[in-house]
Amino acid sequence: MACHTGPVNQWGPSGYGDPCGACGFDWSITETGAAGVIAGAPGRFGALLAGRDGTGRAPGLAWDAREYVWHVADNLRIWAERLSALTPGATLPVAPYDQDRLAEARGYGRMPLTSARWSLGQSSAQWTALWPSVPGDGRLLHPESGVMEVGQVLRQVAHDTFHHQHDVERSV
């Protein structure tokens, strides 16, 4: 069950296009704008899924709408955990995870949308609370994408959130 349409190591505009060819995300977004994409995710996903059970799935997508909400919630939380350890000037290694194995282990398709929306609210709030304290000169070393500056991480996570919102829009 693949979440993305391309290889997992596609990052940023070189992997998705600028703007993203699938969702229209503009990679020149400011850090404030990107942080707003993350902070506003619970409301946008909630509006899209109001009165629905989240089991709709657009053709060509491996996950239904509810599973994408779970994925976005977990992705935000995992990236916040990674960023929480950064200190000024540090470069920290990133331990990658397999999103499909995580989805299977957590049982995204068997858990209710109500819980997914709650989890998204929690992880978005955690990210939003953490973001102002993340040192701008910190870097993460990802085994597939190399050294990622903090601003790149922010835009990548905002893109993932926005992109999967688009997947949910297509699925409902």
Image (cartoon, helix red, strand yellow):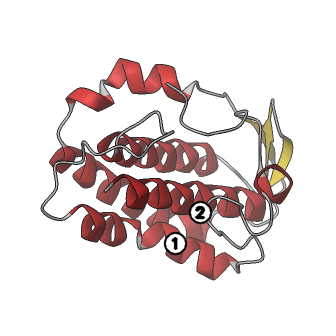
Residue 30 image position (x, y, % from top left): 70, 80
Residue 143 vs residue 55, the one in the foreground: 55
Which residue of the protein is positioned furthest toward the front in this rendering? 59
Q: Is residue 129 visible?
A: yes
Q: Are marks 2 and 1 in contact (CB under 8 Å)?
A: yes
Q: Is residue 137 left or right of residue 162?
A: right
Label 2 amino acid? Ala
Which residue of the protein is positioned furthest toward the left in this rendering? 51
Using the image, determine if residue 17 lies above or below residue 139.
below
Q: Is residue 172 left or right of residue 96?
A: left
Using the image, determine if residue 166 lies above or below residue 104.
below
Label 1 amino acid? Val
Res. 37 mark: 1
Residue 45 image position (x, y, % from top left): 33, 63
Sequence-first tag of 2 and 1 = 1
Q: Quadrant of residue 143?
A: top right
Q: Residue at x 52, y 72 (%)?
A: 37
Residue 133 vs residue 97, the one in the foreground: 97
> Looking at the figure, which quarter contains the C terminus?
bottom left
Q: Residues within 10 Å of mark 2 (few under 14, many from 20)?
A: many
Q: In 3D space, how far apart are the residues under numbered discs 2 and 1 (Cα atoms)?
A: 6 Å
Q: Label 1, secondary structure: give it.
A: helix
Res. 64 mark: none
Q: Residues within 10 Å of mark 1 (few under 14, many from 20)?
A: many
| Residue indicated by mark 2 | 158
Using the image, determine if residue 151 lies above or below residue 63.
below
Residue 137 vs residue 7, the one in the foreground: 7
